[in-house]
Each structure stands twice: as C-alpha cells, then as structure tokens.
Amino acid sequence: MIKHYLVRISGEIVLKSERTRASFERKLVRNIADMARRRNIRDIKIVRGQARLFVEAPKEIENVLKRVFGIYSFSPVKSVEFDNLEDLAIKAEQKFKKLVSGRTFAVRVKRAGKHQFTSMDAARVIGARLYRYSSGVDLKKPEVEVFVEIRDQTAYLYDRIIPGPGGLPIGVNGKALSLFSGGFDSPVASWFIWKRGVALDFVYFNLGGVDAVYRAVRVLKVLVENWCSGYSPKIHIVDFRPIVAQIMEKVKPLLKQVVLRRFMYRAAQYIAREITANALVTGESLGQVSSQTLWNLSVEEEVLNMPILRPLLGFDKQEIMDLARRIGTYDESSKVREYCAIVTGRAATRARLKEVKEEEEKIPADLLEKAVNERGIYDIYKIDPIDFLPRENIVINFIPEEAILIDVRSREEYDAWHPEKAIHIDDISLNSLPRGKVVILYCESGEISSELAKDLREKGYTAYSFEGGVPQLRKRFCS
C-alpha cells in the first residue's frame, strides 16, 4: 500500500545559497532512492518542494527516512485540496475527530502561500470543529497534537513527527578514509563523519588473524547497511602482523604503541592518496588510552601531511558506548577484541619525537610498502563476514554467530555439558545440513570432528573442527 510522507530537510541545507541548496537536495533525493533500492523498495516517487520533500512509497520507506543523513524529520500525511478555510476545517475534522476523542488536544498550523487567513485563524477554526469530540484544549501539554501544514491550496494533515538523523547528505562534502577497528569508537566516529556529508572508505589493520577480521567486518556490515547511502564503500584490509612482530621484537616497550600508530597513519595516508580521499578519520578520544594523550597524538600525526578528523575527541567512553547503542553497532562491537593495544604494561604518555624516530628506524622500511601493496580491497555490500574464514584450514578457533555447532561425542558426554547452541549429532542429519551455512563440529580432542569435517568439505559444505576440542570450548564458554 502506497503512503504519503512529508519530509523536512535539515535546516542547514535550507540556509545554503540557492545553487548549493538545490545541489544538496538533489543528492538527498538520490541517497533516499539508493537506500530504498538496496532494501528492495521499488515503488517510490520523490518530489522536491520548498524546504520539503514529498514522498510516495510503501510504509517500509519509514526505515529508510529514519537513516538518511540530511533529513531532519518526516511525517506520514494525508494531503487534501481545499477551497477556503471552512472547507479545510471540515476535512481536518474528518481526519482527526477519532484521534482527539475524549482527550485534550492542540492544533499546530504552518502555512506558506497567499491566503485570506493566518495560521492562528486556521488553528482556531479547526480547533473549534474538533472541540466537541475532545475533553478540551491544552496548548502546553496536550494528550494529542494534530498538525496542519498548508502549502498554497493543498494541506497536509498528520499527527506524528518522526525524527531523522539530520546533518548533510553523504557525498556533498568530499571523501575521507576511516581507520576502522570494529570496536565501539571507530563505527561511531564514522557515523559522525557521514553525518557531515563525507563519503567514507575504510581501512582495517589486521593484527589478530581470521577471528579479528571476521568480527570487524560484521560490525562494518551493520554500520554500512543501516546508515550508508548514495555510494558503495570499500574496505581495505592490511595485514599488519609482520610489522607488529618487528615492533614487539625491536622497539622499546614504552614506545611500541606510539610507533604502531605512526605506521598505521603512514599506511592510511598512502591508501587515502591512492583513492583520492582528502582526510583520515579516527575514533580517538583525548586521554582515553596512552596513545591518545595530547602529547602522543602530536608525535603520532607528525608523519601526516593531510588532515585527520577526530569527531570523538571530547567524548568519554560511556558516551561513545551509548552512541553505539543508538546507531546499532554496540552488540557486534562488544564481541571485538582489542588488538591495537600491543603493550600490556606501562606505556609512554609523553613520547619524545626524536626517540620515537630512532626506534622506528629499527623496522625494515619495505615492510610497510609490502603490507599496503598486498592489501585486500572489498566492496562492503558484496562481502559476507564468512568469506574471511580460512578455506585452506580444517580447524578453527572461534565460532561465527551464524554457524551450526555440532557435538559428535556420546549422548552421555553431551548431556553432561555442551554449549547452549550446540546440537548433538544424533539430532541432525549431516547429509541434509543447509547449504551456505558454516558448520563447526567438536569432540573431546578434535580428532574425530576433524575427520567428519573433511567428509563434509568433500560434499561441498563449509565445515570445520573446533581447535582443541572440548577443553578449549569450555574455556570459551565458561570463562
């Protein structure tokens, strides 16, 4: 069923020059259409008005309008043509009389165009017709508010105002590269930069192997599929483990963290230039960890000659986590381990540039270039987190969320203890497992489950044996 929506454009767009405003509004329309298309909403019509968009689409479009930057708010509306104020009041009465029945109410009117009446006149006449159904008028704290927006000889009647994210349409303010870890901070920072109209690609520095990449990509998929519109972002995955190994071996413990950040900045800047991005984006918050003190940030960004944007600089951790809940990345981010913190003991909070440069000279210069040149580049919309699972290995040391976990021990051992999501092998047919699912088997030692996983691989399944068997599973689920 097609519904009608009045969409209010962010105020700062409306205040732009006529030429810029028109450009931003066209981009906003394209972004709405792009997100609708990705969600298989095909029957959609968008018409530009003065500081408004008028949208005709199925009800599912509401989940799009809530998430497209540049939209201040929107309302499902009934549009009516009218001849005069009395005619409008009659039509408003038919629309709202059940809504105000037995409740206090207020009528809010906005008007644009030439009329023989004012907005206050319209509110008074419409209110008089609705009064007989209600328990009275209360302009300060009514139980019900009804809205009438008049544009020339058309009026839009509604009773709900649904907030949008505000900001500017993605893509009107250039392009940047976000250093993305998948934890709480970097998704929220990326969200804020999107809100300012900047298109983002992402770089992920792999410090922890398959598990780390898988979980970071899960977070990024949630972020992109919920909030990105108007383009297809890429993620650049750089294997930084060889560089970390050299830092751990050769750099003074107090300076390892700062040296690592400098190498990350260098790599990110190299990629940003290659993709014609104009800035880097990080989730750094001033003083949150040792590498984010004012002194260390100064030393770390000394390697850069492009802007670095830090939208979370003044937020504390709790504020950032609350924002992660709001934008929907909290649950997935809470499963991401912190691999960037390579120093477990004391770390320098006031690193000296001269000393840091001396330490990083110990790292072979070609390692960074090799890591960047051999990076993987992926379209985020087209990848699935399970694509990053190791196809060449039969064992795995973590359990993806969507995996089918199968216990191949005896029934007695299974009943004595098993992970909550585990299924006993007698309760499922291995020959009729759903295709496209990850299957993880386990036994006491991992030997039997490895053989069964090999058999399933030969039948075309994505199957693994859990490394270390039940003892390692107990550590994971009981710790």
Image: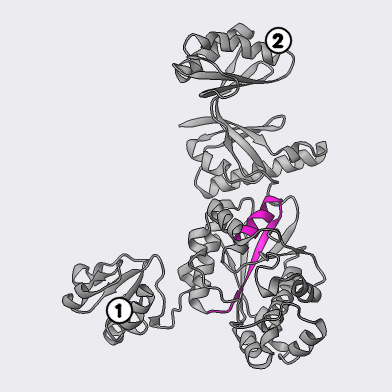
Residue 331, given in percent of the width and then of the height, sits at 48, 60
Q: Quadrant of residue 282?
A: bottom right
Dot 2 alpha-carbon crowd within 10 angstroms: few under 14, some 14 to 19, many 20 or more = few
Residue 377 falls inside the magenta stretch: no
Which amino acid does the dot numbered 1 rest on? Tyr
Q: Is residue 248 left or right of residue 413?
A: right
Quadrant in which the C terminus is drawn: bottom left
Q: Which residues are magenta?
A: 186-208
Mark 1 lies on residue:
442
Answer yes or no: is residue 436 visible: yes
Residue 187 falls inside the magenta stretch: yes
In the image, residue 201 sits, relative to residue 85, either above or below, namely below
Question: What secondary structure is found at the residue carrying circle 1?
Answer: strand
- Mark number for residue 329? none
Which residue appears at 32% of the width and 83% of the height? 471
Q: Toward the viewer: 463 or 183?
A: 183
In the image, residue 280 sits, relative to residue 413, either above or below, namely above
Tell me how many marks there are.
Answer: 2
Farthest left residue? Answer: 412
Residue 138, given in percent of the width and then of the height, sits at 56, 18
Q: Is residue 236 left or right of residue 427?
A: right
Q: Is residue 49 left or right of residue 148?
A: right
Q: Toward the viewer: 199 or 122?
A: 122
Question: What secondary structure is found at the residue carrying circle 2?
Answer: loop
Mark 2 lies on residue:
117
Q: Quadrant of residue 315?
A: bottom right
Residue 294, given in percent of the width and then of the height, sits at 76, 70
Q: Toward the viewer: 1 or 265?
A: 265
